[in-house]
Amino acid sequence: MRRVAITGFGIVSPSKIGCEAFFSALLSAKSGIRLLDVAFPTGVESVIAGHVDFNPDTHFSRARLMTMDRVSQFALVAAREALAQAGLADFASRAGSPPERFGVSIGTGSGGSGSTEAAYTALLEQKVARLRPLTVVLAMNNAIAAHLSMEFGLRGPSSTVSNACASSATAIGDAFRQIRHGYADAMLVGGSEALLNRGTIKAWQAMHTLAKPHADGAHASCRPFSKDRTGLVLSEGAAMLVLEDWATAERRGAHILAELAGYASTTDAHHLTQPDASGQARAMTLSLMDAGLNVDDIAYLNAHGTATDVGDVVETNAIKLAFQNAAATLPISSTKAVHGHTMGAAGAMEFIASVMALRSGKLPPTAFLETPDTRCDLDYIPLQARERKDMRAVMSNSFAFGGSNAVLIAKAA
């Protein structure tokens, strides 16, 4: 089986746009979460959210924007950064991977939900007789992959994964296997989400899983593993990576950032919303086996850590099951305290954070973790970043409603 290199990544997040600025915000625990005023039929509400400060007109022509939902716009901006870092921004530079061998694999939970809501608004509130002709292609989940393939001329394998919060981690894992087993030489992978619309927000409010405003301010409302956590924060954004066959990347002189070395996916078969520690632990163990590593080789773990009461405790127990005695000394953090829960994009965004930690030797903290929950008694790197040199490998967890689990491992290049 072929080795898989990571040669580029890009991010659009509520904290910052661009990977270096994003990672700097993580290290300094600078939250991008804030109050967002949303006009519901019952009146304007201030909702805690990770909203991206994004002007599409600076990235796309007006004519182009007519064909693209916000979710696709995010993905293309992140992909441009990833391909530029990989040195693959133009067609001539991709001679090592012809278009037919360069694919796309994308994760999203809600796809073009903003376009879907706009259609229902037009029908039910504005009483229009007919919708925009492009409504279907704006809203469909695979529109993201379609736009990416057209923008960059990618004609290889194409897939769209919708596994809720594990969507983009699964998409990365599937692409990893495409390259490893020889079906593609390179893949543009990641996830995108733009779900801060009225219907989605109200649906999540009905589940009673969203965070309440914290006394210190809305920015401090997402508090993973904390005794006073009250729930997750809905966010939007995109994260994209370039994966390549190692030999192909070396041959073209690419700067290899890290090796994608292990991936595993499991299903709890337990409950629609309640996670299961054994299923999560099995995903971590299988990913280690896939990478040919032991628990002691993992120098940092980016936890799923959504800040829900049940989820954080179950993940803590799952890490203990998978890592056994090594769990007590394993540095772990949840970066969602800074960027919120980007749902289908979360796995890719947090995997990039993990790889940047591996490369820099700097571990992002769990922001606002002033008083840990006694049931979450592992080393969750509270409040301040930590340095750790000579790291060999890092792990990133993604666990979703429906019991879908995906775990990725990167090794130092």
Image: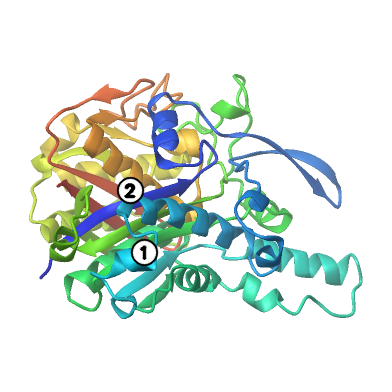
Residue 152 vs 166, above or below: the answer is below
Q: How are the colours assigned in the image?
A: rainbow
- The answer to whether residue 354 is above or below residue 59 is above
Which of these two is toward me, 212 or 63? 63
Q: Is residue 237 left or right of residue 290?
A: right
Relative horizontal placement of residue 202, taking residue 239 as reference (left or right): right
Coordinates of residue 142 in the picture (x, y in percent):
51, 73
In the image, what residue occupies the spot 12% across and 64% down? 247
Amino acid on which disc 1 is placed = Leu
Disc 2 crowd rating (10 Å Cα; few below 14, some 14-19, many 20+) is: many
Q: How many numbered circles are shown?
A: 2
| Residue 62 percent across, percent down from the top left | 71, 61
- Asked if labels 1 and 2 touch by Cβ distance under 8 angstroms, the answer is no
Q: What SS does tag 2 mark?
A: helix
Q: Quadrant of residue 317?
A: top left
Query: Residue 229: percent from the left, percent from the top?
Result: 50, 31
> To which residue does mark 2 refer?
351
Q: Nearer the viewer, residue 272 or 59?
A: 59
Q: Residue at x 27, y 53 (%)?
A: 7
CA distance separating discs 2 and 1 = 14 Å
Q: Secondary structure at mark 1?
A: strand
Q: In the drawing, what numbered circle is on residue 188?
A: 1
Instruction: Work out whether mark 2 precedes mark 1 in sequence or the reverse, and give the earlier one.
Output: 1
Along the viewing direction, whichever of 101 and 393 lies nearer the viewer: 101
- Residue drawn at x 69%, y 54% is 197
Residue 351 left/right relative to 150: left
Examine the rendered structure and indicate whether residue 293 appears above or below residue 229.
below
Front in this rendered view, residue 131 or 381: 131
Residue 156 is situated, as x and y percent measured from the top left of the image, at 34, 78
Say which quadrant the N terminus sits in: bottom left
Quarter-of-image position of residue 379 = top left
Amino acid type shown at disc 2: Phe
